[in-house]
Amino acid sequence: EVQLVESGGGLVQPGRSLRLSCAASGFTFDDYAMHWVRQAPGKGLEWVSGINWNSGRKVYADSVKGRFTISRDNAKNSLDLQMNSLRAEDTAFYYCAKDMQSYGSGLFDYWGQGTPVTVSS
Amino acid sequence: EIVLTQSPGTLSLSPGERATLSCRASQSVSGSYLAWYQQKPGQAPRLLIYGASSRATGIPDRFSGSGSGTDFTLTISRLEPEDFAMYYCQQYGSSPGITFGPGTKVDIK
C-alpha cells in the first residue's frame, strides 16, 4: 500500500524558514518523480514544486521560485521542501504527491494527508 | 500559463441523478493532458480521470471523462451518496506550469 506521510508543518513568523518532509513507502521511491501541492484555507489546489526521480530536474511555481527548494533522498525514501522567506500567503495545507512517471508528468496518483503551515506574527 | 475555468461553481443534485461538470482551458491542452480529482472535506485529493478520459485505478465506471483541446467534461452517470464532494480539473501538459481549476462543488439537493 502506497503511503505518503508529511511532517514539519507549524506556525512560523513572516520572513522565517520551515522545512517540510514526506516519508514514502509501499512503492519503489526512486522510480517516480515527486511533488508538493498546497491548498490555502477554503481555497483550491496550487502546485508548488516537483522533482524528477534522480533530482536532475527541479521545477517551481513562480510564486515560490527563489524562496523554496525541493530535494529528495532516495536512500531514505524521503522528500523535503525547504521554505525560506515565508509570507502570509504561503499559509496552506501542504501535500506531498507521487507522480505517475519518473520524469515528472505532473499527474499525481497518490497524495499524503498533508501538513499545515501557518505564517503569522 | 494555462488558466482553467470550471462550471458551475456549485451543482446541487439528488442521489441517482446525472452530474455534468465542465472545465475550460485558456489555450489548448496538449496531448489531452487533463485530469480530474475528487476531494472530500478533510481529505487529500483522489485521482479520478487522466488523459481526459482514462479512469484511474479503482475508480467506478460511473465516472467518465471526455473532451479535447480547450473543453473537457466529467460525467457522473448516477450519483452515489459518497460522490458529493469537490471536483478539480488539472492540466499537466505544460510542465512546469501545472495548473488546477477552481473546482466544482457537487452537493446534495
Image (cartoon, coloured by chain):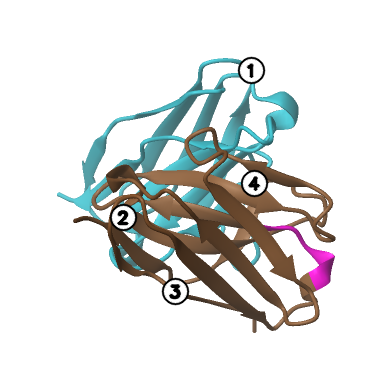
Chain colours: A brown, B cyan
Please name the residue that numbered disc 2 is placed on.
Answer: B16
Q: What residue is drawn where x is 52% and y is 45%?
A: A67
Please name the residue that numbered disc 3 is placed on.
Answer: A8
Instruction: Tell me if residue B62 can be seen.
Output: no
Which dot, 1 or 3, sits closer to the camera? Answer: 3
Which chain hosts label 1? B
Residue type beneath disc 1: Ser
Extreme residue toward the left, this view: B109
Q: Which residues are magenta?
A: A30-34
Q: Residues within 10 Å of mark 4 (few under 14, many from 20)?
A: many
Residue type beneath disc 2: Gly
Estimate the spatial distance between the alpha carbons at disc 4 and disc 3, rounded to whole Å: 31 Å
> Do circles 1 and 4 both sit on a common chain?
yes
Do the residues under discs 1 and 3 have CB atoms within 8 angstroms?
no
Task: Find numbered disc 2 in the image and state the secondary structure of the residue it sits on.
Answer: loop
Which chain hosts label 3? A
Instruction: Tell me if residue B99 can be seen.
Output: yes
